[in-house]
Image (cartoon, helix red, strand yellow):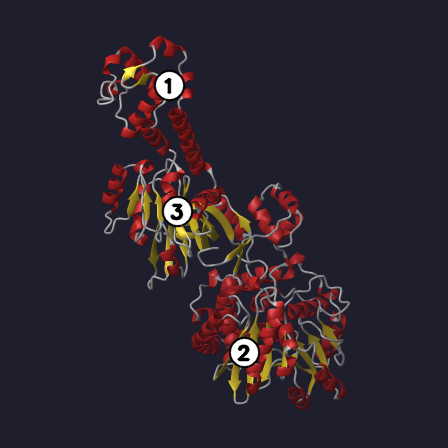
Amino acid sequence: MSLNGKQWVFPEHDRETVNKIATTPGFSPALASLLVNRGITDPGEARAFLCPSLDQLHSPWEMAGMQSAIDRLLKALEDKEKIIIHGDYDADGIAASAIMVEGLRRLGGDVGYYLPSRFGEGYGLHIEPLMQFKAEGAGLVVTVDCGINAVEELQWAAENGLDIIVTDHHQPLAAIGGAVAAVNPLQEGCPYPFKELSGAGIAFKVVTALMEKLDQPFPEDLLDLAALGTVADVVPLLGENRVIVYYGLQVLRRMRRVGFKALSEAVNLDEQKITSTALSFVLAPAINAAGRMGEALPAAELLLEEEPSRAQTLAETLHRANQLRRSTEQNILLEAEEAAIKMISEGNQKIITLAGAGWHHGVIGIVASRLVEKYNRPFCLIALEGEEGRGSARSVPGFDITAALADCSSNLERFGGHEQAAGFTVRADRVEALRECLNRFAGLNLEDSDLKPRLLIEAELDDREIHFDLTARLEQLQPFGTANPAPLFASSNWEIQSWRLVGADRKHLKLWLKKDSRSLDPIVFGGSSLEAKLEKGRRVDLALKLKEGYFREQKTLEAEVKDLRYNDSYKSGCLEVIDQRGCKDRLTIAGEILDRQGNNSIVFASTAARSEKLKKAAFLQAPPHFITSGSFNGPANPPAAGGPILLYDLPLHEDILRHVFSRAARGKPVPVYLLYNREDLKRNRQLLDLSLPSAQDLEQIARAIIDNPGAVNSANFPAPYAGKLGFKPAPSYWERTARIMNEIGLIADDALTRQGPELMAVWPSCLNDSPTYCSAMELREQCETFQRKLLEAAPEEIASILGDLAAD
C-alpha cells in the first residue's frame, strides 16, 4: 500500500502489440504502452493518433437522419422561417446552441435560441416553451444536447404543427417519434462509426453538412465552440473528439471569438497557453457557472457576442458567478464532509447519502464528485427545499449508481443518469428510507475491494527513460482528457535524499531523490501530510507525471509525484522489515531513525566501540538499548521491543538476536531496519577469529607447545604461547583451545602426552577427534550461512527468518 493508502493498478498490456509498435522507428516501449492503452493496435493507427488531421473526421452524411435534417433546414432557410435552437443549461448545451445559432445565421437564417432553467424547468424539452415558440410564429425547433427521449413533448409538437429536428448524443431509451428528423449516432441502426460525440460535436456535424450542401467553406472557426462542449461534457478524447479538440484549441488560441477573449482576460488566462486542461478547469467552469447559479443565457450571449465592451461585461458576470459557485461549493463540501466522516466511521455505509436544507442544487453534483474522489465510495447529495429534495449521485468505477437508484425507485419521485452519475428527486420524508435501500443494494453488489482507492498506472519507466525525448513525445498525446489522460508512470527504487515543504502555505512537498547516478527533484502538490511518513535513505517507488517546463528561459524536466510507496519493506507477523542494506551513510540514517522514533528501541552494533560511536554521532538524548556481538558469549536481556529494532551492523549469528525478537511486541508490526552491508563481513570474520580458533591457529599453538613442553601449565596457560598469533583473542578462544589440545591428546594434566612428530603427521585430521573443534567449526559455518542470508535474501525471506526468532 502506498503512503496515500492507494492501490496501484497496472494495465495488462498485450506485449505482442506493444512490441509491434515499439519496434517501429520513432516509438519507445513507454510510448507504445501508452498508445495500446488508448486502443491503438498498429503503427499506422499510432501515427494517426499522434498527428491529428481534419481528414480524420468522418463524413456527417454517414449519420442516420442527417439528410432529413439538412433538407428541413434548407427549406426553413429558403422560406425565411423563424428557427428556434433549444439547448441545455450546461457548457455542452450552451456551446452546441452557439454553434447552431452562428452557423444558421451565417447562412441568413432567422434564428433565436432558448436555454431552459435548471431551477425552473430542469433538463430537456417541455411543452410550455414549445407552446411559446408556436405562439411567437416559429416554424422549426432544433434541439441540441437534448430531446432524444422527450416522447410526450415531441408528440405534442407533431400534433400542433411545430416541426422539431432532434440533435442529441444521449442514449435513446425508445424509438423516437414525432420529430421530422433525429440526428444521434446512438440511434439503433445508425452506421456512423464514432459514437462518442458530445452535443456540441453533433451540432458541429450538422452545420458542417449544411455548409457542404451549400458549397460553403468548412466551418473550422466553429471548432473552438465544439472543443468547449467536448471537453466540458467529459466525453472520451479519442477518435473524432481528439481531432475536434486538437484543432479547436488552435482556433481558440487565435482568439478571434470576442467572447472567449473577454473571458480569458476576466479569469487572467494566458491566451497562448490554453490547453485542454485550461479549457476544462478554467473556461468551461465559468461557462457552466451561469446555469449552475442562475440562468444560462448570459453564457450563450457571451459566446455569440461580437461587441468587445458587451463581451467584457458578460465575461465579468460569468467570472463572478463562478467565484460564487466556488464559495458555495466549498461551504457545502465542509458541511457534507463532516457528516460523511461520521457515517464512514460507523462502518456500515457503503453508499453515503447526505441531505441538507439550503444546499444549492446547482453545485451538489460537483461536491459529490469531490467526495467520491477523496473517500472512494459512491455519494448521493440531496438539496432539500421544503418537502422535496433534488439529488445528484456519483459513483466509483465498476458500480452502476443508476441501477442502484432503479432498485430503490419506490422511494423516488423520478431519476435518470448513467453508470457513474445520476440525478433524482425524492421527498424529504423518504430520504432515510432511500439511504437504507441504497446500502442494502450496495451490500449485495459493491465489494469492499471496490471501496479501496486505486491509482491507474499506465507504464513503468526505467530511470534512463526519464528525459526530454519522452516528454517531447508526451506532448504529441495532447490534448489530454477523458480516456486520454496525462500519463501516470511508475518508476522504482529511488532513494530519498531530502525534502522540504514549499509554497506560501507550506502545503506542497518538494523531494530530492537519487537512483544510481540519476537525480530527480519532483513536487507533490498538497503533499504536506506525507512529510511525517518520509525517512531519509529509504527507497521508494514513484507514481509520477512528466512534462517539459522552463525556468529562467532554460528548459526543465518537471516531475509531479501523485503517490509514492516504500519498496524496501515487507510485513510478516509482528515484524516489518525495512531494507536499507548498503545505504551510503548508515550512521546519519540510524541517528535520524532514533531521533524520530527512538523510544524503547534496540540497536545491534557489532562492538561496544561502534555502539559508542553511534551514541556520540547521533547526539541521542535517550540512548536506546544496545546489544553487541559480545552477547554471543553471554545472555542479553533487552527490553520488549515496542520501538524500532536497528540492525546497524551485520549480526554474527541468530542466537545474538533471539532474545530481542522473542520479546517483540505483538499487535502493530515492529519496524526492523536493516542498515548493514557487505563491508561488515570482514569485521565479523575478525570477531569470529577472536573466539573460534582455526586449524591454522591451532597448528601454530600446537607447535609452540611441542617446542616448549615445560611451559605447559594450566596456571599460566596460554601466556607462553599467546605471542605466536599476532592478535589478542578473547578468553573464550583460549578456553576452547585448551579443551581441543586436551581432546586431541597433546596435553593432559599440565603435561605433554603425545610426541610432536606423531601429532604433526596426522595434522589437521586429528582435529576431527576434538568435539570442541568440530563444534567451533559448525558454529563458524552457521554464522557464515546466517550472514549470507541476511546479506543476500529478499526482504520477505529475512522477515520470515526474523519472524521465526520472534515465534520461539
What residue did someone put label 3 on? 661
Are dots 1 and 2 in contact, CB under 8 Å? no
Q: Earlier in the sequence, mark 2 or mark 3?
A: 2
In this rendered view, identify the residue nearer to me: 342 or 652: 652
Question: Which residue extends farthest top?
Answer: 757
Calculate the distance from the C-alpha at mark 2 to the C-alpha at mark 3.
74 Å
Mark number displayed over residue 262:
none
Q: Is residue 235 left or right of residue 374?
A: right
Based on the displayed image, in which of its 4 quarters is residue 149 positioned? bottom right
What residue did someone put label 2 on? 301
Label 3 packing within 10 angstroms: few (<14), some (14-19), many (20+): many
Calculate the distance from the C-alpha at mark 1 to the C-alpha at mark 2.
108 Å
Q: Is residue 232 left or right of residue 571?
A: right
Residue for point 59% across, 47% down: 32
What residue did someone put label 1 on? 744
In this rendered view, identify the residue nearer to me: 452 or 655: 655
Amino acid on which disc 1 is placed: Ile
Mark 1 or 2: in front is 1
Residue 239 lies, with reference to residue 539, above or below; the image says below
Residue 527 visible in the current orientation: yes
Residue 730 pos. (x, y %): 28, 29
Q: Earlier in the sequence, mark 1 or mark 3?
A: 3
Residue 164 pos. (x, y %): 71, 80
Residue 467 visible in the current orientation: no
Amino acid on which disc 2 is placed: Glu
Residue 445 lies, with reference to residue 155, above or below; the image says above
Calculate the distance from the C-alpha at mark 1 to the C-alpha at mark 3.
39 Å
